[in-house]
Image (spheres, rainbow, N blue to C red):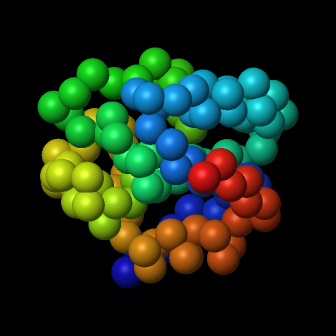
Amino acid sequence: MESMPKYDIVYLVGHSARQENHLDNIIPLVDPQHEAGKSVGIVLMQDGVIGTSMLGTVPEALKYFFEMDIPVHALAPDMIARGLNPDTPIEKIDVIGYADLVDILAVSGKIVSIL
């Protein structure tokens, strides 16, 4: 079994980047943390998974996180619930299950919930 990453700070985002700007709003928070050498990860859940499929346009905020090499995870059950195929995510999205989410949260230093 592959171990899940340990982050200094993990952001849980449950709002669609296509309909709201919550993902854009965390860029000013993530950027200085990342620049300071903090290990930062993002988990997209609930409606946050909208925009993670290869079939759509990649939201600008996700492009930013990819360019900064900030890991982005998406919950497979939430993708399925919204009619998205978890087998066809955007290339840099790491699709995870609930057990993986628990593992990430258990070892990460801080959790910031934007649900």
Where does residue 71 sit, x and y in percent of width and height?
A: 52, 44
Q: How many marks?
A: 0
Q: Residue furthest front?
A: 19
The percent position of residue 29, horizontal first and vertical second, equals: 77, 32
Quarter of the rendering containing residue 102: bottom right
Q: Is residue 104 above or below residue 62?
A: below
Between 110 and 22, the residue placed more toward the observer is: 22
**Which residue does the image show at 55% across and 76% down from the upper left?**
103
Q: Is residue 88 visible?
A: yes
Left or right? Give the position of 81 relative to 111: left
Q: Is residue 79 left or right of residue 114?
A: left
* Residue 99 sits above or below residue 49 on the image: below
Q: Residue at x 64, y 63 (%)?
A: 6
Give me the residue at 43% from left, 55% from top: 46
Tell me residue 106's x, y (percent): 66, 76
> Which quarter of the figure is the N terminus placed in?
bottom left
Q: Quick one: 96 or 25, which is closer to the camera?
A: 25
Counting from the top left corner in percent of width and height, residue 51 is at 33, 35
Seen in the picture, residue 27 relative to 70 is either above or below; the reply is above
The vertical placement of 101 against 57, above or below, is below
Determine the image quadrant of residue 31: top right
- Is residue 67 visible in the rendered image? The answer is no
Tell me which residue sits at (37%, 70%) in the image: 97
In the figure, residue 34 lies in which quadrant?
top right
